[in-house]
Image: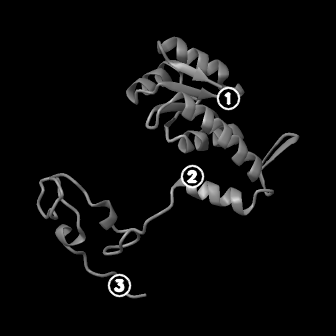
Amino acid sequence: PGPPPPARPQAERGVASLSGEGREAGMEAGAIDFDALPLHGVGERRPRGRTLTEMFAEATESAPSATAYVREEESLTFGGLAQRVERYAGALAARFPPGTVVGILIPNGPDFTLAYFAALQARLLPALLNPLHPPLRLAALLGMVEAEALLVAPASRELGAAVKREREGLLVLE
C-alpha cells in the first residue's frame, strides 16, 4: 500500500538517545520511550498488549475442554492445565515473594508449560535453562541471574540434583 513514510528523527519518535539528545520532558538521559517504538514500520505506535498470563487465562476460559496436550496414554485439557497451573502458582507464591528468580530446567512439554505459567502467575521471574547444558554451566547461569530455586520435572530430576551439587544453597523443587 505505497512506500513507507520517511524516517523521523529520534526526538520526533519519542526515543531518547543514550547521550540524552532528543530527550522528551521528564525522560532521563539514556531512557527509551518503548511505547513510541515502531511495531511494523516507522511511525507506527506499539499497541498495548496483553501479558502471557492474560492470554493463557483467555485461552483456558474460552475452550476449557479442548485438548492442550497428549502424552503417551494421557491427555490434558486446557481447563485441567489451568487448574494445575493455579495450584502450582499458589505453592510457588506461598514460598517466594514476587520478583524472585527461579530457574526452569524442564524439557519442552506439559511439565515445562505448567512450570512456566505457574511461575508467571506467581509473579516470579522464570530463567529458562537448556537441559542439554552440563551441570557446571547451568549452575553458573543460575548464579548470574541470582536464582533462588530451580524447578525440575521427573525427566530432569537427576540433572537438577547435579546442578545443586555445583551451586551451594540452591533449592531444587519438583
Tell me which residue sits at (54%, 43%) in the image: 120
Residue 71 visible to the viewer: yes
Q: Earlier in the sequence, mark 2 or mark 3?
A: 3
Rendered position, 90 above or below 150: below
List the residue tagged with mark 3: 3
What secondary structure is marked by label 2? helix
Q: Nearer the viewer, mark 3 or mark 1?
A: 1
Q: Nearer the viewer, mark 2 or mark 1?
A: 2
Dots 2, 1 in contact, CB < 8 A: no
> Residue 8's mark?
none
Horizontal arrangement in the rendering, residue 90 relative to residue 19 (left or right): right
Q: Nearer the viewer, mark 2 or mark 3?
A: 2
Horizontal arrangement in the rendering, residue 114 relative to residue 31 (left or right): right
Residue type, numbered disc 3: Pro
Tell me which residue sits at (11%, 60%) in the image: 21
Residue type, numbered disc 2: Thr
Horizontal arrangement in the rendering, residue 152 relative to residue 47 (left or right): right
Dots 2, 3 in contact, CB < 8 A: no
Where is the C terminus found, in terms of image quarters? top right
Real-space Cα separation, disc 2 to disc 3, in angstroms: 37 Å
List the residue tagged with mark 2: 53
List the residue tagged with mark 1: 153
> Whole-percent x and y of residue 8?
22, 75
What secondary structure is marked by label 1? loop
Rendered position, 6 above or below 36: below
> Whole-percent x and y of residue 74?
85, 41
Judging depth in this view, the residue of 56 and 19 nearest the camera is 56
What secondary structure is marked by label 3? loop
